[in-house]
Amino acid sequence: MQKWIITTFTRPCVKILPLILLYSSSTAQANTQNTQTATTPKLILQITVDALRGDLLSRYIKHRAKGGFNYLLNEGIVYNNAHYQHANTETIVGHVSLATGAPPAVHGMIGNIWYERSQHRIVYNIEDPNFTLLTKGADVDNQNEIDPTQKAAKNEGRSPLAILSSTISDEIATAFPQAKVFAVSVKDRGAVSFAGQYGKAFWFSKASAQFVTSNYYYQAYPDWVNQWNNDNPTQKYHNTQWTRSLNPHQYHNKEENDPAFNTDYKTDIAGFSTRFPHPYGPSNDKYFTTKLTLSPAGDALTLSFAKALIENEHLGKDEVPDYLSISFSSNDYVLHLFGPSSQEAEDNLFKLDLTLKKLFQYIDEKVGLDNTLIVLSADHGAPEIPEYLVRKLATQSAQKNSNNKAHYFSLAQLQDETLFSTIEYTFGLKKGQGKTLIQRYAHPYLYLDHSLIKKYNLNLKQVQLSIANEIMKLKGIEYAIPSTQIATGQLPQTHLMQLVTNNYHPSRSGDIHIIFSPQVFINEFDDLNVASMHGSPWQYDTYVPVIFVGETLSPKAISRFITPYDIAPTIASYLGITPPSGTSAPLLQEVLQEKLAAQ
């Protein structure tokens, strides 16, 4: 069955796809009818831990509280072999895939940014000039913002309208008109993706130190939001620091306890340091709120706001199922700066564990865990830091060390004059004209200047293929795939090429999809160097946990292969409603069989 679903996502013959979707939808509808008589939960709580690679839960399992991650692992249906089936494992791609049950080829979110040819510029995934933020001065501060993708936005407006498929929250709002639907995250894209078109989204503004939204969702803030923001909860971190939660010798990575251990391979942002303790500094420092999001404080603020939302919006107080998505973003930022094998990564998950324990206690008090369906997953995984791998190999023989291929890739290599000498010779171009054919790189795509290609009377397909062949010669490039081959189904029938196809959208994807070799990635963005960067099709980036916990579900571990796309249609079937419009993913039968057995 899983082979079938992977094929449906990558089938090059467009004429077949509607039939597959029709079959899948009818199958889901049939399963939906079988679940309509079961008890409906009062609250669906969908938790996303940004960049939670699938192995990290088991790697850092020591010293955990009973009511956090362990509650999920001990009480839930745990799928330990879940992998995304698209090639660009970035934040918006994974979040929207979770929300829609579809790959980017269907929902359209092919990357955090892409080149919009109709606008002749790079666009940020959820920017929308038709809407504005409700809070003045809450827009991205380009001078101090460390996320280069957010700086690509040319306006402050945010909306879900660029998402091309309905979300599970949309379907809940449609099926239950009285349902209350919300999404909360530090990241704007982490909230908007799950709120969909019919829910309400809130995210944290580093510029204003508040949770904000746009006038797509509200014309004015509810009173409780103003109250939470006016209480200025970030102020308690003024001149404090992120310190270890445990004794230094209790951490998995003990070598960092040595004062002589060189942590220069980690990233220091504005004096946040590459080793404990990490100072937040004064609250009037321009990077103060940024540092909060780079630490467990970001998740603590998210929990505080989510608890206020649950209380004031009266979630789970009647028989109509409500929906709340909480995306915890700090783990992603921590891994970017310090890497998955750092003490910071372990400590952040330890503190997130306590945050989850508090969340579940609050849910139990206000709604009842027996009345709540909890689903946890992640938007993507994460690679190790190349320098960390180099050091690990250095402890082995010199021969093994010499075979290490992990390194950072510089975008300057794509602008090297020698790269285009063959192109210029092949197409009879003057020296320097070959380089001008490249318009922009927006991960993972290289966009070519179609107007110049037309001006030079060149064949687009031939230019794509020639440039791809030259790029393939660069160290650190595993594949360079022309989009004309993707669109016409001319790729080899391999698993990796299926992931490339699943990521392709004809109006948004670029001319050449570049895949870096394993443990090779770009780490420099607008003069900011990060230690670790996800976004590849390799398993360390596609591997995530999937856990369902609910009153009717008995704990068990499932090792068969699944995809996170399966989550949204499974929630829909559990509730007895229509699945999101773009999904063709199979249902997780272990979840549904448990519910049927409980009827």
Image: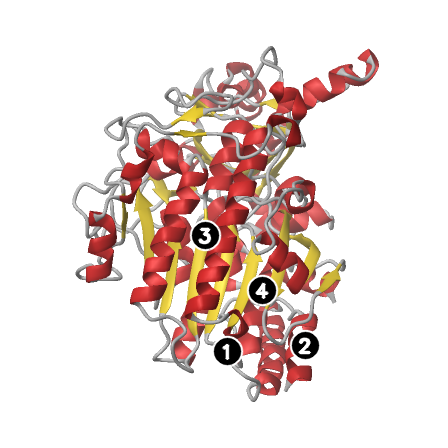
Residue 462 percent coordinates (x, y): 57, 36
Amino acid type for the residue under numbered disc 4: Ile
Q: In the image, is residue 5 above or below residue 527?
A: below
Residue carrying label 3: 327
Residue at 26% over, 34% down: 141
Contact between marks 4 and 3 (CB within 8 A): the answer is: no
Task: Say what secondary structure mark 3 lies in.
Answer: strand
Residue carrying label 4: 567
Please rate how many residues cluster around mark 1, counting C-alpha atoms within 10 Å: few if below 14, some from 14 to 19, many from 20.
many
Quarter of the image where one finds residue 475? top right
Task: Say what secondary structure mark 4 lies in.
Answer: helix
Q: Label for residue 440?
A: none
Is 286 left, or right, of 551 in this rendering? left
Q: Nearer the viewer, residue 385 or 585?
A: 385
Residue carrying label 1: 578
Task: Say what secondary structure mark 2 lies in.
Answer: helix
Amino acid type for the residue under numbered disc 1: Thr
Contact between marks 2 and 3 (CB within 8 A): the answer is: no
Which of the image's four quarters has the C terminus?
A: bottom right
What is the CA distance from the residue labelled 2 to the residue labelled 3? 27 Å
In this view, the mark in front (4 or 3)? 3
Residue 117 percent coordinates (x, y): 37, 44
Residue 32 percent coordinates (x, y): 58, 82
Residue at 63% over, 46% down: 542
Sequence-wise, the earlier of marks 4 and 3 is 3
What is the CA distance from the residue labelled 2 to the residue labelled 4? 15 Å
Amino acid type for the residue under numbered disc 2: Glu
In this view, the mark in front (1 or 2)? 2
